[in-house]
């Protein structure tokens, strides 16, 4: 997604309208920093601090995977073994 100069969200791949890198909202979006509370979290490499929109609204942005990542990794491992055996 990208922001138009009118602060509209436009789908990625819009080759008819060049990316407006001078747009204040765009600069704010790409300069998002990982919150301090996330820097020690073991799933940071997966979620990268959660949803920036929720973070900007000062809401907790932890994804559900934070609370069930072990089961998720187990399922991914099982799936990848089955795919490898094909």
Image (cartoon, helix red, strand yellow):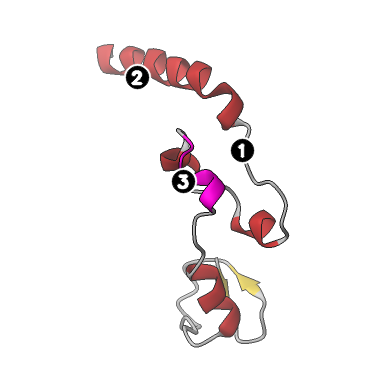
Measured from the top left, where is residue 48 in percent x and y?
48, 48
Occupied quadrant, residue 42: top left
Which of the two residues, 83 or 23, is positioned nearer the viewer here?
23
Q: Residues within 10 Å of mark 3 (few under 14, many from 20)?
A: few
Q: Is 23 drawn above or below residue 77 in the view shown?
A: below
User: In terms of secondary structure, where does tag 3 sit?
Assistant: loop
Which residue is depicted at the point 52% across and 16% down? Answer: 71
* Frontmost residue, 7 versus 27: 27
- Residue shown at the point (49%, 18%) measured from the top left: 70
Find the magenta span and give its range.
36-41
Q: Quadrant of the N terminus?
A: bottom right
**Dot 2: element:** helix
Give the residue number, with chain letter if any, for mark 1. Answer: 63
Residue drawn at 50 percent across, 55 percent down = 34
The residue at the point 34 percent across, 19 percent down is: 80
**Dot 1 and dot 3 residues touching (CB under 8 Å):** no
Label 1 element class: loop
* For residue 37, above or below residue 4: above
Q: Give the number of the disc on residue 39.
A: 3
- What residue would you read off at disc 2? 80
The reply to whether dot 1 and dot 2 touch (C-beta < 8 Å) is: no
Q: Is residue 41 above or below residue 57?
A: above
Q: Which mark is residue 55?
A: none
Gap in angstroms between the C-alphas marked 1 and 3? 15 Å
């Amino acid at each position: 997604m990208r922001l138009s100069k009118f602060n509209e969200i436009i789908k990625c791949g819009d080759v008819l309208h060049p990316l407006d890198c001078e747009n204040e909202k765009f600069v704010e979006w790409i300069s998002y920093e990982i919150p301090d509370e996330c820097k020690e979290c073991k799933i940071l490499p997966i979620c990268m601090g959660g949803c920036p929109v929720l973070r900007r609204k000062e809401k907790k942005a932890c994804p559900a995977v934070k609370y069930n990542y072990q089961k998720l990794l187990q399922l991914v491992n099982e799936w990848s073994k089955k795919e490898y055996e094909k």
